[in-house]
Amino acid sequence: VAPDLLGRVLVRRLPGGSRLAAKIVETEAYEEGDPASHSFRGRRTSRNALMFGRPGLLYVYFTYGMHFCANVVAGATGEGCAVLLRAAQPIEGLSAMEKRRSTDNPRLLCSGPGRLTQAFGLDARSNGRDLVSEGSAIFIACGAPARDFKIKSGPRIGISDGLDRDWRFVIAGNAFASRP
DNA sequence: AGAGCGATTGCCT
DNA sequence: GGCAATCGCTCTG
């Protein structure tokens, strides 16, 4: 699911009818057999409960005392599996993102997991939202995107265990990834 | 009950 | 390249 999400568009409807939209350009996969995952060894806690929920839901967690990270629940119900959204290329609603992010550099709006949630206004209240219903206030647009890009994979970022897995996926050459 | 640290970011030199 | 910010989750005793 992690590479499949590349090129798809994350959309947020704002009160008033305007929208935020950005193309997903970088993702990471996490699952139960994975020592870097919140769901390692199938352990359920109050924080990670959503990872074991229905696929297509939004799992948001708080980290480093100040940042939120957004994930797409990706396993069957009961399986602790999710895809971290690490970076996206802004498409629509840039001025609203600029305001939330306090910068007008488009490269700094959604290029990083904490930046992306801040630009989209996602936080603990967004937990459990349905990302696969286009009626949602926050969702991933349906329909297969153009596959006119190559996918690069490598070790995930910011972890100390599980570095043997190449479960970070980026659109090759895209300038909006969290790092070159 | 308390310590340690994290799926990060931004500002400093 | 280095480090502070900042707080909730997890593990240890």
Image (cartoon, coloured by chain):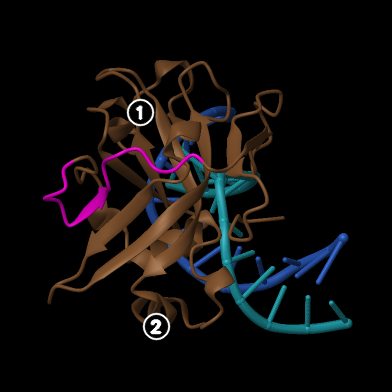
Chain colours: A brown, B cyan, C blue
Residue placed most toward the observer, A53 or A11: A11
Q: Is residue A66 visible?
A: no
Disc 1 designates what residue?
A74
A14 in magenta: no
Helix, strand or loop status at disc 1? loop
Q: Quadrant of the N terminus of chain A?
A: top left
Q: Chain of mark 2?
A: A
Q: Secondary structure at mark 2?
A: helix
Q: In the rendered view, tell whether residue A36 sits above or below residue A97.
A: above
Magenta segment boundaries in residue numbering = A133-147
Q: Position of residue A130 (x, y in %)?
A: 19, 42
Residue located beneath label 2 in the image: A99
Q: Which mark is residue A140?
A: none
Q: Residue at x 24, y 28 (%)?
A: A53
**A75 w.r.t. A121: above or below:** above
Q: Nearer the viewer, residue A33 or C2?
A: A33
- Left/right placement of residue A163 relative to residue A17 reads right
Say if residue A13 shows up in the picture: yes
Residue drawn at (40%, 17%), measured in percent from left and top? A42
What's the residue type where badge 1 is placed? Ala
Type of residue at label 2? Answer: Lys
- Splitting the image into 4 quarters, where does residue A99 fall? bottom left
Quadrant where the C terminus of chain A sits is: bottom right
Q: Earlier in the sequence, mark 2 or mark 1?
A: 1
Rendered location of residue A75, percent (x, y):
34, 22
- For disc 1, the chain is A
Left or right? Give the position of A61 relative to A159. left
